[in-house]
Every structure is written in structure tokens, then in C-alpha cells.
Image (cartoon, rainbow, N blue to C red):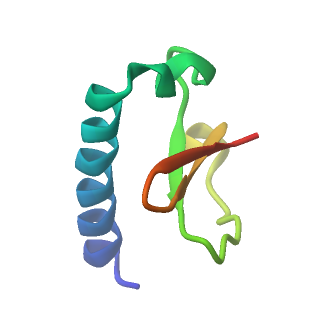
Amino acid sequence: MTNKEYVDRNIGLTFDFLRQIIDDPSVLDNIQDGAIIDFVEKDFTKTEYPNSVKPNKYIKVNNHFELIK
């Protein structure tokens, strides 16, 4: 996946995630302020990140977003 494709995918997922939060604000109960999140597909493999931007919460992409603990 190119950098542009990755960015485009994440922008789309972010808006989908925001729609879900508007419908059900309790989604945010387990995500602390300032969390760095990453959206992962069902065949989840962790990506290596620089320490400065390493996600501390992963959001699994299904029909609904699901926090991975």
C-alpha cells in the first residue's frame, strides 16, 4: 500500500469512526484523552512505528469499530 493509499484509507475510516461515536458516544469510554489510535483490519498485523507516534490503542475495523485491549 502506498503512503497516499494508507492516508486515504485512514481518512475514510476516521470519518466512519466519528459517525459511530456520534451514534454511540460510549465507544469513547475506554479510550483515554490523548490516545494515539490505529485502525486495523481483521487480518491484523502490528506495524512498526517510531516511538514518537506509536499507537497505544488499536481499533479493529468491522461493521462497527471495536477497541482491541
Nearer to us in this view, 26 or 56? 26
**Residue 13: quarter of image:** bottom left
Q: As drawn, is 29 to the left or to the right of 14?
A: right
Q: On the picture, is 43 further left or further right than 41?
A: right
Q: Foreground: 46 or 18?
A: 18
Total count of labels: 0
- Coordinates of residue 21 in the picture (x, y in percent): 34, 30
- Image point (59%, 38%), residue name: 52
> Relative to 37, is 10 above or below?
below
The image quadrant that residue 22 belongs to is: top left
| Depicted 25 relative to depicted 69: above or below | above
Residue at the image position 35 percent from the left and 83 percent from the top: 2
Q: Residue furthest bottom?
A: 1
Residue 66 % position (x, y): 57, 46
Q: Residue at x 25, y 55 (%)?
A: 11
Residue 56 against residue 14 in the figure, above or below: above
> On the rendered image, what quadrant is the C terminus found in?
top right
Residue 57 position (above or below residue 9): above
Residue nearer the viewer, 13 or 25 = 25
Residue in view at x 49 percent, y 28 percent: 27
Quadrant of the frame with the N terminus: bottom left
Q: Nearer the viewer, residue 12 or 3?
A: 12
In the displayed structure image, the side of residue 45 where residue 12 appears, left or right: left
